[in-house]
Image (cartoon, grey):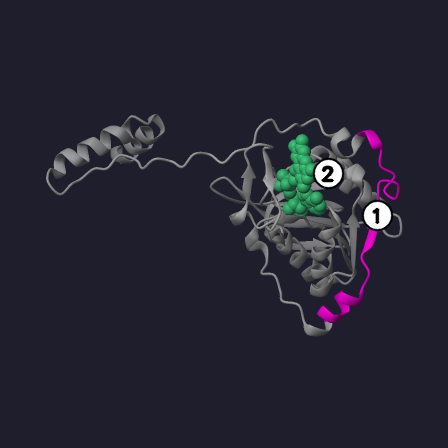
Amino acid sequence: MNVICCLKQVPNTAEVKIDPETNTLIRAGVESITNPYDTVALEAGLIIKDKYGGTVTAISMGPPQAEEILREAIALGADEGILLSDRAFAGADTLATSYTLAKAIQQLERPAPVDLVLCGKQAIDGDTAQVGPGIATRLGYGQFTYVAEIREIDEAKRRITVKRKVEGGFEVIRGPLPAVLTVELDLAKPRRASLPRLIYSLRTGITLWNAETIHGDPQRLGLKGSPTWVKKIFSPPLKQGGPVFDARKEPRRAVEDCLNILLADEMFAWHFLKRWER
Ligand SMILES: Cc1cc2nc3c(=O)[nH]c(=O)nc-3n(C[C@H](O)[C@H](O)[C@H](O)COP(=O)(O)OP(=O)(O)OC[C@H]3O[C@@H](n4cnc5c(N)ncnc54)[C@H](O)[C@@H]3O)c2cc1C
């Protein structure tokens, strides 16, 4: 199996602050990590490699320091790390990001057909969950989002069966390879790197690709290829506490007040009365 894992370097969001003047994230002094969903995508790729053989290639689009997360991926078992880094990629929105990653994956298809592209469900900074589906659409691959379990890969019939999260439960679906999967945290528990692999990763080079290498159309890369503009970015104001119903003095009144508020919500009232009728 030829598996590609898309890894994004993200700020540790618990520490993110926003510059109110420029409306941008203050990245200075903030620790960078691999997007947690992507560490699960990588683990899934490594499990597939352990079971079916083949290779796992980790790719990331970002500034030179994103090399760190690719080295970590190699320490965990990835065969190669490819960093897509070029000034032309800067300022990319999800459309340009997925275009750039898809063009890179097309290059990786040349030596051997790609079977699977594994992405996180979403990045914890951008949070759009659009990049995985964007890659699948551009490459014409099957698309499986919110994957919580890989049930079966049938190499002979070139198809995959997965369990994916849907509202209120799960569904099991099957589709053809090649496919893009975006994964949930419960899919796998990331392994730890062994000492020999850690040493190996420090000695291994990371492949650097730019706009030319991926044969990207300059009009579709970075800011030029990004129709989305961030007008304002801000932290939402802290929510005020909700109403308090003190049942110590007048329990009946407290219950009535509480019910009045709840029943004013049409959805709640509908569910409540439906259960009441039973
Ligand atoms: C106008 C505009 C300008 C922007 N400028 C910048 C900027 O200058 N610098 C900047 O850092 N961000 C910038 N962004 C944010 C950037 O567009 C998003 O971070 C990026 O497109 C990924 O979207 P997301 O974080 O919502 O990813 P999601 O769609 O939530 O990510 C899903 C999965 O896709 C994969 N993935 C996503 N991004 C990458 C990546 N870069 N490399 C590898 N895999 C990836 C991962 O597997 C991830 O788990 C800008 C956004 C806009 C709208």
Q: Residues within 10 Å of mark 2 (few under 14, many from 20)?
A: many
Q: Residue furthest front?
A: 21
Q: Is residue 205 visible?
A: yes
Q: Position of residue 85 (x, y in %)?
A: 79, 45
The amino acid sitting under disc 1 is Trp
Q: Secondary structure at mark 1?
A: strand
Single out the mark in the foreground, 2 or 1. 1
Q: What residue is rendered at 59% in x and 58% in y?
A: 188
Q: What is the span of residues highlighted in magenta in the rendered image?
A: 197-219
Q: Quadrant of residue 106?
A: top right
Q: Does the numbered disc 2 mark a residue whose Cβ is under 8 Å from ligand 1? A: yes
Q: Quadrant of residue 134?
A: top right
* Residue 98's disc number: 2
The amino acid sitting under disc 2 is Ser
Does label 2 or label 1 sit earlier along the sequence?
2
In the displayed structure image, the side of residue 156 where residue 173 appears, left or right: left
